[in-house]
Image: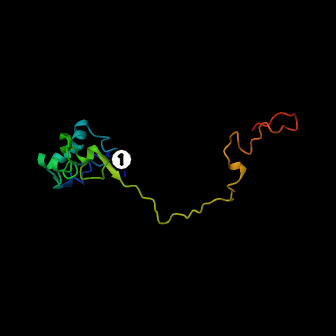
Amino acid sequence: MLRVRNYSYAPHLQREGRLICPLPSPPKVDSNGEWHANLKPCERLFYHQTLASARASKRFVATSQIPKDSLDFKLQSRYIHSREIFPELIDYVLQPETCCQMPQTFRVLRNTIDIKLPKPEKNGHPLKIGGLKEKISPHSVKLINSGPHTQMVNNGYSRQPADGNFFRY
């Protein structure tokens, strides 16, 4: 999943609830311009909705999963009573979205848009046949690690025919 910044005037809060009626929208803008291109600063502030302002609006109805008091907030924490014996005090209030990598939940923490990337198709993968093109004998001298006592080292037992020096490989 890819997260892209939301450049729109209204945040995407479909996971947290629904809007009874639409939020105020700015006048229509041409397709290549931004929504706040020809607006005065006071109009831009009026039309732009943050996450907090959209949640606080009377037009927004939250889902039942949103905690209403401190007990609901603690019940949704990552602490599980049956798994931990001696939890720390902070474990009762840590929420799964902020403390660890979790799958997507109902909470929206940033004004972003989640784009699902296409998954690669696993059924139509091409068949790959591998293997050795030649069979190498395990008794081959060329496979041995080089060292002073291997068959390829002929140090001191014979001399080069050209100048009589020792063989050094």
**13 left or right, relative to 1:** left
Q: Residue at x 20, y 54 (%)?
A: 17
Q: Quadrant of residue 70?
A: top left
- Residue type, label 1: Val
Q: Residue at x 67, y 55 (%)?
A: 138
State the residue in front, 154 or 132. Answer: 154
Q: Check disc 1 and report its element: helix, strand or loop.
A: strand
Image coords of residue 159 (percent x, y): 84, 37
**34 left or right, relative to 72:** right
Structural crowding at the residue carrying mark 1, measured as other residues with C-alpha within 10 Å and reported as few (<14), some (14–19) or many (≥20): few
Image coords of residue 26 (percent x, y): 25, 46
Q: Residue at x 87, y 38 (%)?
A: 161
Q: Tell me: residue 121, above or below residue 149.
A: below
Image coords of residue 60 (percent x, y): 17, 52
Q: Residue at x 68, y 59 (%)?
A: 135
Q: Tell me: residue 97, above or below residue 120.
A: above
The residue carrying mark 1 is: 4
Q: Residue furthest right?
A: 162
Is residue 10 visible in this depiction of the protein?
A: no
Q: Quadrant of the C terminus?
A: top right
Numbered label tally? 1
